[in-house]
């Protein structure tokens, strides 16, 4: 991404975000059985698709719209590293505990 | 990037090692803390959802309204809201772009459109909340004495997908429309987790609609499922809506400053860039709220 974000690039990112959101909504409405009946690490393929597409959208918003892609590397890392480390850590603890909690409550 | 800069005194002061102004850095650090706050909220939502997955409602059956149209339209309204917010993010980045070229007219137009987009989103959210609080026509049966003294809700036949253990929309993927075909039929029996509610429980239960937000019964139940569902809905979308609201207010202040040539005199439009960062962050949070509240 160049320092001067041209309007063409902005609209390109807009179309990417729009198409990804449309794909999510269509998948959410039709719910293809293939994606629902198959699991990957305990999550249905459909939900995994949603999570991956969400991260794709987040990438484009942060890198293109918030211009993080054209910042210095040290600024990029000091913003992204805390988020990359702390959020997965937090989610790992919470979601593992919830599985245990449900087991204790409902067996 | 100035690679050839002398590294000797780089961190010794008087330099800008990150090549970003003080205001921009502080905005970024604020956004990191805010991102962690929202991830804690969404993580807590996930915790409660998986803990009570049997009683957790399917979002497809809760958010089914669309303005001026009757019928069952899951996801479409919230998709429209997402589109509005993404659109206002685009107009914001175009305003920042115009600001970099000292194009006052461009900043005025795009920032104005951003404010309109934000206000539209807030209005849409108010509509969504109204229907969530008001509830459906058929409502649900509230059974006061559930597990651990928690009240539980039982649903009627034509809406029985609530009661089953299919919080991931597993069972209703086929014949989805059939479940709603018998909407006008008289109510015969209520179902709790797939079983018909026994007679003695029916006596102590009562009919409830929606999710009360005010009054003596606020947060005591919701017709959709486990009580924490509506609590998290109000809290997380409310906290996000509060961000949108403050974002609109800040955008209006900056808009007035732009009209008064404040940034033209200052020689740069960096303030537009800073509020732009905040605005994009609000959009970013919505992308995650959309996924984890409505899709997953």
Image: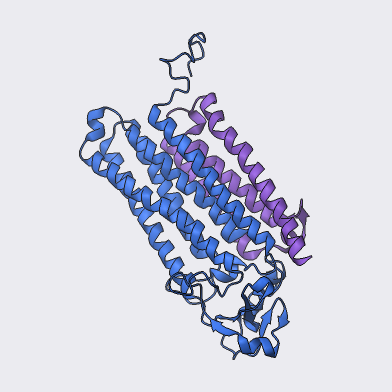
Chain colours: A purple, B blue
- Answer with left or right where residue A96 lies relative to residue B246: right
Label tally:
0
Classify A39 as above or below B205. Answer: above
Q: Does the image show residue B73?
A: yes
The spot of residue B131 in percent (x, y) is: 46, 72
* Residue B176 image point, x, y percent: 65, 73
Left or right side of B208 for B147:
right
Depth check: give the residue in front, B100 or A62: A62
In the depicted structure, whether residue B129 falls above or below residue B183: above
Side of B43 where B263 appears, left or right: left
Is B184 left or right of B189, judged from the image as shown? left
Residue at x 51%, y 27% (from the top left corner): A75
Where is residue B11? Give x, y as percent: 49, 15
Q: Residue furthest left?
A: B260
Q: Depth check: B40 or B4 in front? A: B40
Q: Residue at x 54, y 56 (%)?
A: B290
Q: Quadrant of residue B14?
A: top left
Q: Quadrant of residue B189?
A: bottom right
Q: Position of residue B72 (x, y in %)?
A: 55, 74
For the C terminus of chain A, the image quarter is: bottom right
Please, which residue is most extreme toward the front here? B149
């Amino acid at each position: 991404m160049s320092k001067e974000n041209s309007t063409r690039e902005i609209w390109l990112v807009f179309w990417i975000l729009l198409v990804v959101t449309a794909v999510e909504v269509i998948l959410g409405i039709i719910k293809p059985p293939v994606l629902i009946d198959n699991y990957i690490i305990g999550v249905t393929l459909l939900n995994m698709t949603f999570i991956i597409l969400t991260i794709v959208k987040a990438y484009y918003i942060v890198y293109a719209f918030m211009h993080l892609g054209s910042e210095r590397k040290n600024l990029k890392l000091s913003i992204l590293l805390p988020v990359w480390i702390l959020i997965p850590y937090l989610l790992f603890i919470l979601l593992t505990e919830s599985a245990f909690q449900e087991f204790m409550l409902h067996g | 990037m100035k690679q050839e800069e002398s590294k000797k005194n780089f961190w010794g002061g008087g330099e800008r090692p990150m090549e970003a102004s003080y205001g921009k850095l502080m905005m970024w650090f604020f956004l990191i803390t805010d991102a962690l706050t929202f991830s804690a909220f969404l993580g807590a939502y996930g915790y409660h959802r998986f803990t009570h997955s049997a009683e957790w409602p399917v979002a497809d059956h809760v958010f089914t309204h669309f303005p001026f149209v009757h019928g069952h339209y899951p996801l479409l309204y919230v998709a429209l809201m997402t589109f509005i917010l993404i659109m206002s993010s685009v107009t914001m980045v175009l305003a920042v772009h115009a600001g970099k070229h000292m194009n006052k007219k461009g900043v005025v137009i795009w920032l104005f459109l951003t404010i309109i987009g934000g206000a539209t989103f807030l209005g849409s959210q108010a509509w969504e909340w109204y229907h969530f609080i008001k509830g459906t026509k058929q409502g649900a049966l509230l059974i006061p004495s559930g597990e651990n003294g928690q009240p539980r809700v039982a649903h009627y036949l034509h809406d029985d997908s609530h009661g089953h253990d299919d919080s991931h929309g597993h069972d209703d993927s086929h014949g989805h429309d059939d479940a709603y075909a018998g909407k006008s039929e008289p109510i015969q029996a209520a179902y709790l987790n797939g079983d018909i509610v026994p007679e003695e429980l029916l006596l102590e239960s009562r009919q409830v609609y929606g999710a009360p937000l005010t009054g003596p019964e606020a947060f005591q139940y919701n017709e959709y499922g486990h009580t924490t569902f509506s609590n998290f809905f109000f809290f997380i979308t409310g906290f996000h809506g509060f961000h949108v609201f403050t974002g609109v207010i800040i955008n209006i202040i900056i808009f007035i400053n732009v009209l008064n040539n404040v940034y033209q005199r200052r020689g740069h439009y960096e303030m537009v860039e800073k509020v732009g960062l905040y605005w994009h962050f609000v959009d970013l949070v919505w992308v995650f709220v959309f996924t984890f509240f409505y899709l997953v």
